Image (cartoon, coloured by chain):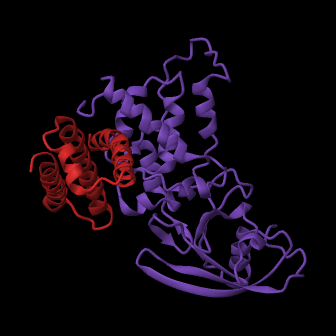
Chain colours: A purple, B red
Amino acid sequence: MISQPLRNNAGQFKVSVWRGDGTGGRHVDYDVPGLESQTVLDVVTWIQRHSDPSLSYRFACRVGMCGSCAMMVNGVPRWTCRTHVRNVIKGNVLILEPLRNLPIIKDLACDMSAFFEKWDDAMGRFHPTATRSDDVESIRPGSIGRREADAGIECINCAVCYSACDVVAYKQDYVGPAALNRAWTLVNDVRDAARGARLRVVASDAGCHSCHSHQSCTTWCPNKLNPTASIAGLKRQSALAILTGKISLNDE
Amino acid sequence: MLFLAQRISALIMAPLALVHLVLIVYAVQGGLDAQEILSRTRGSIAWATLYGLFVIAVSVHAAIGLRTIGQEWLKLQGTLLNVLTWGSGLGLLLLGFRAVYAVVAG
């Protein structure tokens, strides 16, 4: 449905799409008809359906929930299903490339494994304190910890922040903004049992203290989250935990 | 633990840098010449402590910062990275203390 031309009333524009795989590639130009309320994902789908069926890309929900369709649009990482062409096109040209900082599988599809593995490395999993036979814990929505957690909880793991981050580009083992933002939500979750272990993990060389606060993650996060603030929170809490002897970086 | 050393050295450095800047403005505004400044600083344990601490904080802070730049921009690792860190830290320490010595004891 999304690739059906509604009304070809805006002429054509040029789309330069990176085509290739992990070994290399080049940009291929396509002429695409301009449509009303056209998203970048609509453009990619139009190319695949009308110009070149071998074009590879990834999407699922089309409504900004699943985090699958992110790619570089005119040099900037964006979720393409919610990005309107008219807001990002420059000089009647759209340049589409796979997300930065991730290995390319083919064309616009990246291998997201490293992104999700790092999420795990930063202890992104919840460690419950209660069992299923316990009562549901009462959490005050207005408590400081809950408010901090709520501020970062709507991450959809689209990897836009990971792609925007220069420290990820500089430093291969840096876990990145999404993983650290997730860790910060759990550090503030009173139901979680692994606060100390998580602070120790994020204080390691691959963790929060490598962040230079460039704020590219916050600038480009499509959900308007602030991973830089989450990372700053982790920096404060982990440093405090070390200085007060609550955690040691030498622990096994 | 390097990040802690860098943050603690920054905490020490920030007020000392302000004191240093205020001092420069005060000395210039007051019309003090080099001899008059030296007559006040020579033999002073307070000035030696203030600038000595400043030099130590700068050396620690800058060496760790340069280490990060070497690691991320120049992709240095292992011995080369340690040489850059220790070399820059000890170099700054040496130059700094030479200046402190000249002002308070020379």
Residue A6 point in image, percent of width and height: 89, 74
Quadrant of residue A31 in the image?
Answer: bottom right
Say which residue appears at 68% left-offset and 23% top-offset.
A141
B100 or A95, which lies in front?
Answer: B100
Q: Is residue A163 visible?
A: yes
Say which residue appears at 31% left-offset and 61% top-offset.
B69
Say which residue appears at 45% left-offset and 37% top-offset.
A234
Residue A63 point in image, percent of width and height: 74, 55
B74 or A25, which lies in front?
Answer: B74
Classify A83 as above or below A15.
above
Q: Quadrant of the N terminus of chain B?
A: top left
| Left or right of B104, for residue A82 | right
A71 or A219, which lies in front?
Answer: A219
Quadrant of residue A150 in the image?
Answer: top right
Q: Is residue A207 visible?
A: no
Say which residue appears at 15% left-offset and 62% top-offset.
B80
Residue A233 point in image, percent of width and height: 49, 37
Number of marks: 0
| Left or right of A247, for residue A119 | right
Classify A137 as above or below B8.
above
Classify A47 as above or below A72.
below
A198 or B14, which lies in front?
Answer: B14
Residue reaching furthest to the left: B106
Residue A195 point in image, percent of width and height: 43, 27
| Left or right of A138, for residue A239 | left
